[in-house]
Image: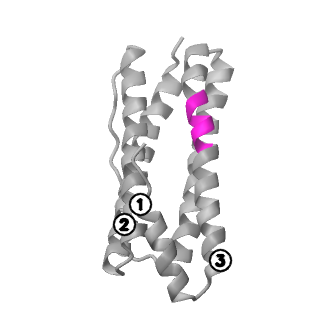
Amino acid sequence: MFSKKLAKEMNLQIMHEMYSAYLYLSMASHFEVDNLKGFAHWMKVQAGEELEHAMKFYEFINDRGEKVNLEQIDQPPLEFGTALDVFKMVLEHEQEVTARINLLYDIAVGDKDFASQSFLNWFVDEQVEEEKNASEILETLKMIGDNGNTLFMFDRSLGEREQE
């Protein structure tokens, strides 16, 4: 059975996923202005993934016979600092998303809602990948430091990220 509590939390998750897309688009704009087109591209691809995640929840809620209730999305920050600062924020944000997914999974387990558990398994795995990607970029940025040439080369490699 799809509980009202889980349906409510999944509706909130749509908002969180949409906020993630907003956040990554704002970060993309920050990088565009700083002429780091590869970083901007990476963020735009990430924003697209977050929109896809929101739509997965949208479809699942509807498939379970509940009505989607779209919550208001907060405005993301406009200023971010260095690329290192941005990816520290990205990792923290993805850890928050992981905590939300874990909350949803805990509710589904408590409800013995096997369909929701199955659905959420994909997100559990996805969050491992999201945190890994953010962490790897963060660690690379720490190694690069203030080396502009290396940052330029890393920017180019991030620009090669493909849509999934």
Mark 3 touches mark 2? (CB < 8 Å)? no
Question: Which is more toward the observer, 83 or 18?
Answer: 83
Outermost residue to the top: 1
Give whichever of discs 1 and 2 has the lower sequence position.
2
Amino acid carrying label 3: it is: Lys
Residue 64 seen in this snapshot: yes
Label 1's element? helix
- Rendered image: mark on residue 28: 2
Residue 22, magenta (yes or no): no
Residue 95 seen in this snapshot: no
Give whichever of discs 3 and 2 has the lower sequence position.
2
Between the residue at mark 1 and the residue at mark 2, the CA separation in whole angstroms equals: 5 Å
The N terminus lies in quadrant: top right
- Rendered image: mark on residue 14: none
Mark 1 touches mark 2? (CB < 8 Å)? yes
Mark 2 Cα-neighbour bin, 10 Å: few <14, some 14–19, many ≥20: many
Seen at 51% across and 80% down, the residue is 151
Relative image position of residue 85 (x, y in whole percent): 55, 76
Q: Which residues are magenta?
A: 121-127
Identify residue for label 1. 43
Relative image position of residue 59 (x, y in whole percent): 37, 24
Relative image position of residue 2 (x, y in whole percent): 51, 16
Between the residue at mark 3 and the residue at mark 2, the CA separation in whole angstroms equals: 20 Å
Identify residue for label 3. 142
Mark 1 touches mark 3? (CB < 8 Å)? no
